[in-house]
Image (spheres, rainbow, N blue to C red):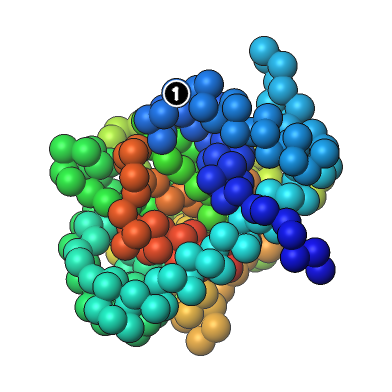
Amino acid sequence: MPTNVNVNFNRIESFLRIVDAGSISKAAQVLQVPKSKLSRNLALLESELGVQLIYRTTRQFQLTAAGQKFYQRSKLALEEVTNAYIEITSRSGGLSGTIRLTAPEDLGTYVLLNIIDQFKLKYPAVNFDLLFTNQILDLVSERIDVAVRIGRLKDSTMISRVSGGIDFILVTSKKYLESLSTTISVNDLVDLKTMAFVSGAQAVQWNLKSAKERRTVKVKPHLKFDHFVAMREMIALGHGIGFVPRFICEKGLANGELIHVLKSWGSDLEPVQVLVPHQKEMPLLIRTFSDFLTRELSNKFS
């Protein structure tokens, strides 16, 4: 290994931020630095490496093969350096403070509490204010440090990272299944007892897909809910069929409380995203937790 390599970590960090943001302009907005500075750092880094990392025109922004490889390896390397720094500072009491986190109630209850438990084991001096709600809270006005959202987002004022995706499955109970006189098909769903997650008074439709086709089924739910936990409980009690996120059903499917029906039909993946408000310098505590959260969610939903 060469010992005379002079690595400029600022230029590498600029490159990583540009890739994460999706463009030099957006990265400059996030970091609140001149666009010209990031452009120069990128050009100097490419010159040092002797390869083009990003193919860019006025309309296109794409990593080259070398850029993709360098991004993956340098990101991991910087994460290791950051983790080493955090480990040392946390031993001396350096990593502490309070994190305000918001997330959908169901995801928070079924997934995030376990992740927070793991983080607290590593960093017991860190406190949390947890806002689990299906309302979309304003991160700035509510002084929220980190948010987890499900679905595609249009808000470009936040730093966002996709951490896998959630799929939906059709589930019922043994009790309800035994009450039916025949096996069921997708066509039967409109006439069966169904339950649905509903916000407002809009019509309820399930967008189903199989390996060969897609179907939109307009169901007539006799029970409507504004969160999935209660719906899962009513499904288990025998009140019909629901189209529910898989992660909410895992325990019930394992113990026989719930039954996965029409297994060849499911849903598109709904992306899980970790959001942090734009800021010039992200505090070490928030960066550490958001990195940890993104990694754990990716392990769960990838």
The x and y percentages for residue 155 are: 39, 30
Q: Quadrant of the C terminus?
A: bottom right
Q: Is residue 267 visible?
A: no
Q: Is residue 146 above or below residue 127?
A: above
Residue with the most extreme top position: 58
The x and y percentages for residue 188 are: 60, 50
User: Which residue: 41% across, 78% down?
Assistant: 87
**In this orientation, which residue lies closer to the viewer: 45 or 118?**
45
Compared across the picture, whether 259 is left or right of 103 comes to right
User: Which residue: 18% across, 46% down?
Assistant: 143
User: Which residue: 39% across, 57% down?
Assistant: 287
User: Which residue: 59% across, 33% down?
Assistant: 41
Compared across the picture, whether 127 is left or right of 267 comes to left
For label 1, the residue is 34
**Image quadrant assignment for residue 300:** bottom right
Q: Is residue 84 above or below residue 215?
A: below
Q: Is residue 271 above or below residue 99?
A: above
Instruction: Please state the total of marks drawn on the protein image.
Output: 1
Q: Residues within 10 Å of mark 1 (few under 14, many from 20)?
A: few
**In this orientation, which residue lies closer to the viewer: 130 or 134?**
130
**Image quadrant assignment for residue 42:** top right
Compared across the picture, whether 276 is left or right of 191 comes to left
Q: Quadrant of the N terminus?
A: bottom right
Q: Is residue 260 visible?
A: yes
The x and y percentages for residue 124 are: 26, 81
The type of residue carrying mark 1 is Pro
Q: Secondary structure at mark 1?
A: loop
The x and y percentages for residue 80 are: 56, 68
